[in-house]
Image: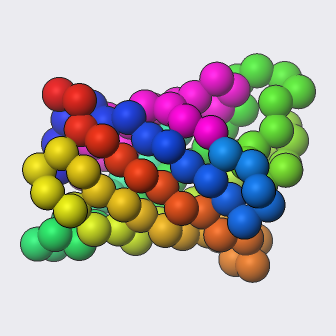
Amino acid sequence: MQGLWTIEFGSSTGRFGAGVVVFKEGRVMGGDSGYYYIGTYSLVGDEFSAKIDLVPFVPGIETVFNTLGHNVKLSLTGTLIDSEHATAQGSPVAMPHLKLGVKLTKRN
């Protein structure tokens, strides 16, 4: 799982986006056009889970959950499909009624 991955994601609000993440030694780091990501992950077999904070760095850009200007804590669970592909699902911890789907592709 360790390495550089590109991500494509969409939420139950109908919004979508893309970015990059690095998985390394239990840590997740990455970002997109308005938010950086930082968190932790664990991998057991082909199953992984992650807790990730989305932190805004560009004023005025909404998340895919239609939130603006504050951190969002995500909880995700996923599966490695093969050595270069994975999928994950989750939701914001404070808004569990909203859902997120993620497609990951390993680049390095």
Residue 7 location, quadrant? top left
Q: How many marks?
A: 0
- Going by the image, does 9 lie left or right of 79? right
Residue 13 location, quadrant? bottom right
Quarter of the image with the C terminus is top left
Can residue 94 be seen?
A: no
Find the magenta span and give its range: 17-36
Can residue 63 be seen?
A: yes
Q: Is residue 23 above or below residue 82?
A: above
For the stretch drawn in magenta, the main secondary structure is strand
- Going by the image, does 66 lie left or right of 94? right
Residue nearest the viewer, comparing 70 with 32: 32
Q: Is residue 4 above or below residue 52?
A: above
**Where is residue 36 drawn, in percent x and y?**
57, 31
Q: Residue at x 36, y 61 (%)?
A: 87
- Residue 51 sits inside the magenta stretch: no
- Going by the image, does 34 lie left or right of 106? right
Q: Is residue 78 above or below residue 83?
A: below
The colour scheme applied to this rendered structure is rainbow
**Where is residue 94 drawn, in percent x and y?**
74, 70
Q: Residue at x 67, y 45 (%)?
A: 16
**Where is residue 17 drawn, in percent x and y?**
62, 39
Q: Residue at x 69, y 52 (%)?
A: 72
- Residue 27 sits inside the magenta stretch: yes
**Where is residue 47 drawn, in percent x and y?**
23, 72
Q: Residue at x 84, y 49 (%)?
A: 67
